[in-house]
Image (spheres, helix red, strand yellow):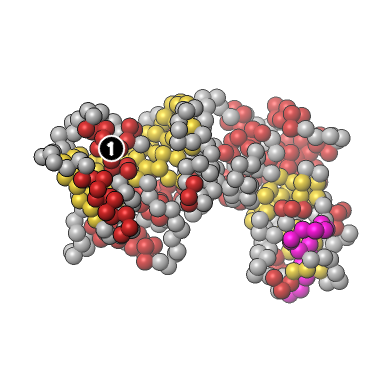
Amino acid sequence: MAGLFPDDQDACRLLDAGAGIGSLSAAFLERWQRGGLHFRRVEVDAFELDPALLDHLLQTLQQFEGRDDFAANIYAEDFIHAAVDALSGNFFAKPLPRYTHVILNPPYKKINSKSAHRLALRRVGIETVNLYSAFVALAVALTAPGGQIVAIIPRSFCNGPYYRPFRDFILARAALHRIHLFEARNATFKDDSVLQENIIIRLERDGCQGPVAVSTSVDDTFADLITYEHPYDRIVFPDDPERFIHVPTSLDKNALEESDAIRYTLNDLGLTVSTGPVVDFRLKAHLRDTAEPGTVPLLYPVHFSGDGTTWPMDGIKKPNAIQRNDDTEKWLYPNGYYCVVRRFSSKEEKRRIVASVVEPDVFDGAPVLGFENHLNLFHANKQGLPEQLAHGLTAFLNMTAVDEYFRRFNGHTQVNATDLRLMKYPSRQALFELGIWSMNQNEMTQEKLDAQLESLTT
């Protein structure tokens, strides 16, 4: 991270927020001392709230004292409140400078919508859901034009609706110059149960946006480091209103990017994707382990596999049925053909997108079905799909090229309905033809399925 900063001969004012014991500041200062950076003076502002770490932080920074061109300030206070007070012009706030350099390994924790942190951030126009993105947004706001920000953070901000305001905030104020992706989700934040990939980014406040260097490694040994340069419009698509940040891992374009046939939205196809509406703990009183009079099937991810739909299932820890009554009726869908996608994958599972067909004949004539919250459900205005379309959509989503494309902007264990909604799809006719082909296969293999990508037409 310290090596990502470009050399500069001016004075440096470095911010390390959530400094811990000062490891990042030390790496930056060591590079300066060795002549890798040619600042005429360096002053560090290190924020750390944990009193157990302050002595260690002080010891780290004291190693660099004793020279006239260095100074360090330790702030044992809440960075968010200090930064917001300084940015909002609070008369009683301690003034903070405009930083020339920022190096960050911020804390990772969700921010409650009504918490003091969330309310404080709104005072300076920052709307975000996690401490790590709050730290980065505040760092960008505190940085002088041309200033450099390097941060190691979870990749979850790259997609999804909750981080859209954060993406808008940083991309409007800074150029994105570098992304490094750690491909192992469990290697970098071992102690924090962060079940997603992690990245290092370098931003330049008010910088000129050019190509973006993207590098990858499995873990922090960097033994397999590979770096490519991509035009910015491969990272943030110009026509994407959500401003998803894609992380391509090779110079080759994904097959979906190359295809002129895969350009339709779900709205074009007359389809919708929704999160399964049955939240089991909220409807616990209405759930049943087995079907009984007055109940209808309740479907979890466990009911779907490569062999199709299996219901009911014995020996599972999930209920197989839900009562149909006034309290549950609004959560139920008419029995029919649907395509479902699991919302969660295990930490290092081979596939991120796993799609299955809901087969109505399995449910013994049940009039309606319940879909549990861990499923995403493709439907037509809360109605089932034509059989061929359900099979075609499922086949398309299970193609390797689709999974690889999805991984470019989704680096965590969750497949959100929003992510699926913003993808592009083949035409409705192409999906029908793919479905007919899929239904005629006695045995489906990944190789046979992937070969069908070339046959998709407009």
Please give the range of residues in magenta.
312-326
- The answer to whether residue 260 is visible is no
> In which quadrant of the rendered image does the N terminus lie?
top left
x and y percentages locating residue 266 in the rendered image: 64, 46
x and y percentages locating residue 44 in the rendered image: 22, 45
Secondary structure beneath dot 1 equals helix
Q: Which residue shows up at 32% across the image and 54% down it?
A: 53
Q: Nearer the viewer, residue 50 or 338?
A: 50
> In which quadrant of the rendered image does the C terminus lie?
top right
Does residue 93 sit above or below 23 in this rendering?
A: below
Q: Which residue shows up at 77% across the image and 53% down it?
A: 303
Residue 307 in which image quadrant: top right
x and y percentages locating residue 393 in the rendered image: 72, 42
Q: Give the left or right position of residue 42, taking residue 180 as reference.
A: left
Q: Which residue shows up at 20% across the image and 30% down it?
A: 38
- Residue behind mark 1: 28
Determine the residue located farthest toward the right in the rendered image: 364
Q: Which residue shows up at 30% across the image and 33% down it?
A: 5
Please check the rendered image and state whether residue 296 is part of the magenta-colored stretch, yes or no. Answer: no
Does residue 121 sit above or below 416 in this rendering?
A: below
Please check the rendered image and state whether residue 314 is part of the magenta-colored stretch, yes or no. Answer: yes
- The answer to whether residue 58 is visible is yes
Q: Nearer the viewer, residue 163 or 183?
A: 183
Q: How many marks?
A: 1
Predominant SS along the magenta part: loop
Residue 33 in which image quadrant: top left
Q: Give the left or right position of residue 447, taking residue 195 as reference.
A: right
Q: Amino acid at mark 1?
A: Phe
x and y percentages locating residue 436 in the rendered image: 82, 37
Q: Nearer the viewer, residue 176 or 241?
A: 176
Q: Give the left or right position of residue 250, taking residue 179 as reference.
A: right
